[in-house]
């Protein structure tokens, strides 16, 4: 497995690029790249030349996360303005505008079935679930307070929820917190199951393997990448190599490779079976906030975005 640089766009946004995801292909167009930036905009790009296909406005503060519905027709963006904007990818028409209290909207992800949108709830120490038919808030999955603490204790602030992920069967939700805790929920019952321990600094990104529903990958400010059996509550592997915070993780669609972006300004490719890094890409000149593999088969594509305002696209083979 290896990465080969295909295209980089400098000044893709006017400010830092914080978020990236792929919008699945539809009957009428190929998969597109979706990016979100501190410049308050969301932009669409067509690979492999990274041609700008549109600029979406509507937020009044930086865009912290973007997510695409599995149908390829709908996407959502979450901003520091505490709003989630749901829009039609091809027309840019707003479908819904979802409001949350301040600092309670961080990373967001649609479930594989496309029926729910999960949002990392920041200071609420919870994951919020929105129904994608009605766009109503239908569940709040709260992380339990440690035993012996009172509601007034400051310990809850440490459970500030930064990241969220769905298992490929849609049955589990995992979220990462500021204190390094990873919490796992039963999505169907809306029930907290257990914590996964091992990180001691913020977990800003996590992702389930697309081929092994129990396998969860996490990236942390402690510079490590962990592999967990999310059902068995066990740490099954730890990988190190980044010189600074791991800000983003994603798994290839074949489940064989992991990509990470770091504040050490590099993108790394990891062989999951070997549990080690096989390649380091140094295209960016500032911290790498997002990495995303294109869904579907070959040819494989990986995109990365950075504080340096650029987007890089790689061939994965």
Image: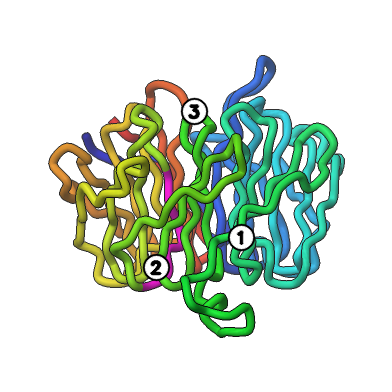
Highlighted magenta segment, given as a residue range:
201-207
Q: How far apart are marks 1 and 2 (CA)?
A: 15 Å
Q: Circle 2: is it few (<14), some (14-19), or many (20+) Cα within 10 Å? A: many
Name the image quarter holding residue 5.
top left
Crowd around label 1: few <14 · some 14–19 · many ≥20 (10 Å) = many
Residue at screen point 55% across, 70% down:
160
Q: Which mark is residue 180?
A: 2
Numbered disc 2: secondary structure: loop
Left or right: residue 17 versus residue 140 is left
Looking at the image, residue 167 sits to the left or right of residue 64; the answer is left
Counting residues from the start of the chain, the first of labels 3 and 2 encountered is 3
State the residue position of label 1. 126
First in sequence, mark 1 or 3: give its number. Answer: 1
Measured as percent of width and height from the top left, residue 125 is found at 59, 66
Q: Name the residue under label 3.
A: 169
Residue sitting at 34 percent across and 48 percent down?
217
Whole-percent x, y for residue 172 in the image: 50, 39
Q: Nearer the viewer, mark 1 or mark 2?
A: 1
Q: Which of marks 1 and 2 is nearer the N terminus?
A: 1
């Amino acid at each position: 497995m290896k990465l080969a640089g295909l295209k980089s766009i400098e000044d893709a946004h006017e400010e830092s690029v914080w978020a990236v995801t792929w919008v699945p292909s539809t009957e009428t167009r190929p998969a597109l790249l979706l990016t979100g930036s501190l410049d308050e905009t969301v932009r669409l790009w067509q690979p492999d030349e990274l041609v700008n296909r549109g600029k979406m406005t509507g937020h009044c503060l930086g865009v912290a996360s973007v997510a695409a519905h599995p149908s390829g027709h709908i996407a959502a963006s979450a901003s520091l303005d505490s709003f989630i904007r749901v829009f039609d990818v091809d027309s840019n028409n707003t479908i819904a505008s979802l409001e949350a209290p301040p600092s309670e909207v961080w990373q967001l992800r649609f479930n594989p079935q496309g029926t729910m949108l999960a949002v990392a709830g920041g200071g609420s120490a919870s994951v919020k679930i929105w129904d994608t038919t009605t766009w109503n808030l239908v569940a709040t999955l709260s992380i339990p307070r440690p035993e012996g603490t009172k509601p007034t204790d400051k310990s809850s602030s440490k459970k500030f929820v930064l990241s969220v992920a769905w298992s490929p069967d849609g049955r589990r939700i995992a979220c990462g917190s500021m204190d390094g805790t990873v919490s796992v929920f039963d999505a169907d019952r809306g029930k907290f199951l257990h914590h996964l321990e091992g990180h001691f600094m913020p977990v800003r990104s996590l992702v389930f393997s697309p081929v092994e529903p129990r396998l969860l990958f996490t990236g942390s400010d402690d510079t490590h990448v962990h592999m967990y059996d999310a059902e068995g509550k066990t740490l099954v592997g730890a990988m190190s190599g980044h010189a600074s915070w791991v800000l983003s993780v994603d798994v290839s669609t074949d489940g064989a490779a992991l990509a990470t972006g770091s504040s050490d300004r590099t993108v790394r490719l990891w062989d999951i079976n070997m549990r080690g890094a096989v390649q380091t890409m140094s295209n960016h000149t500032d911290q790498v906030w997002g990495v995303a593999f294109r869904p579907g088969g070959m040819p494989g594509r990986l995109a990365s975005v950075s504080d340096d305002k650029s987007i890089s696209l790689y061939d994965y083979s």
